[in-house]
Image (cartoon, rainbow, N blue to C red):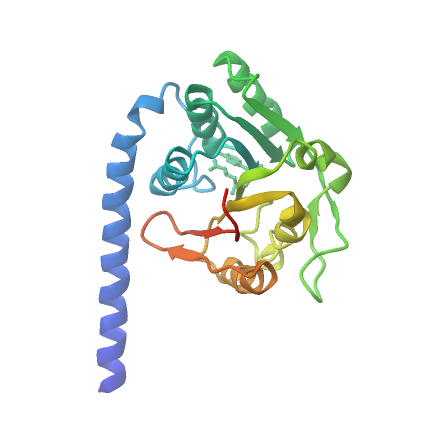
Amino acid sequence: MNTVRQHARRVRDRSALRADRSRRDLQAMQVLAPLSTAYLPWSASALRPSAIVGILNEIVIRRRRRVVELGGGVSTLYLGRLLGRHGGRLHTVEHDADWAALLDDQLCAEGLREVVTVVLAPLAPTPGGWPGAPPEWYSEAELDCVRSGGPIELLLVDGPPAWRRELRHSRYPAARFFRDSLAPGATVVLDDIDRRGERDILARWEDELGITFERRFADGSIAVGRMPGRP
Ligand SMILES: C[S@@+](CC[C@H](N)C(=O)[O-])C[C@H]1O[C@@H](n2cnc3c(N)ncnc32)[C@H](O)[C@@H]1O
């Protein structure tokens, strides 16, 4: 009987969370209206609207100017448009050549090429993958320009793709690779924490970076952490 009640409660909690997420995403689309200036192919792989609002808020409130994003898409355009208006620079790392070209065309059409640089970095075996299951990560030789562009104030990790079981820890190398390039107090964001793989990664990053991430399940399923020190 107890188990039946517990199951019923879990079902109720899950549907309440789903309803809450939908409501927040609808509100977020209204907030994003001033930056929604062109049609974008928004798919299930994109950050949810409420997650994008959370990240843009962090940029405005904490005055983040140097931003790096792993995995480009709808988010790249919103980040670029905001940084174009508020001042700042974005490097977006993308593994897929066709997708990188499409993003680049759109940025060019919107006059954002001075603000956003799309860095094409195909996937390649990495020495620093998840223990026991080395995944592919972005080819590190292509990322020198990203690391050498000055201290990173916000790092958004939404790539490489990790939706298949065997790829579920593929975003893990990001903290090792960028750790020494982060500014004091820098913000680190990981998307898709409703998935087991990203939750595993978060637990390790908390140990390795010595910080605690805020888990925002209702606001787009992102985790937000800040490095020690004052920006
Ligand atoms: C999790 S997605 C990154 C999504 C991106 N940060 C956003 O919010 O739109 C990971 C990869 O999926 C691919 N991708 C992103 N958006 C896509 C779309 N609408 N259709 C097809 N592929 C997409 C890109 O190669 C990207 O690097």
Residue 71 in sight: no
Q: Nearer the viewer, residue 133 or 151?
A: 151
Q: Does residue 105 lie above or below 217 as drawn? A: above
Q: Position of residue 59 (x, y in %)?
A: 42, 35
Residue 117 in sight: yes
Q: Does residue 83 lie above or below 222 as drawn? A: above
Q: How many marks?
A: 0
Q: Nearer the viewer, residue 100 or 144?
A: 144
Q: Nearer the viewer, residue 3 or 63?
A: 63
Q: Position of residue 157 (x, y in %)?
A: 54, 45
Residue at 73%, 35% (x, y): give it. 144
Q: Does residue 167 lie above or below 182 as drawn? A: below
Residue at 41%, 56% (x, y): give it. 214
Q: Position of residue 67 (x, y in %)?
A: 54, 34
Q: Is residue 25 left or right of residue 128?
A: left
Residue at 64%, 46% (x, y): give it. 178
Tell which residue pokes out farthest to the front in this image. 230
Quarter that holds the N terminus: bottom left
Residue at 47%, 14% (x, y): give it. 110
Q: Is residue 194 left or right of residue 145?
A: left
Q: Position of residue 180 (x, y in %)?
A: 66, 47
Tell which residue pokes out farthest to the bottom in this image. 1
Q: Could you say which quadrant of the image residue 58 lies in?
A: top left
Q: Does residue 222 lie above or below 205 as drawn? A: above
Q: Is residue 122 left or right of residue 172?
A: right
Q: Could you say which quadrant of the image residue 217 lies in?
A: bottom left
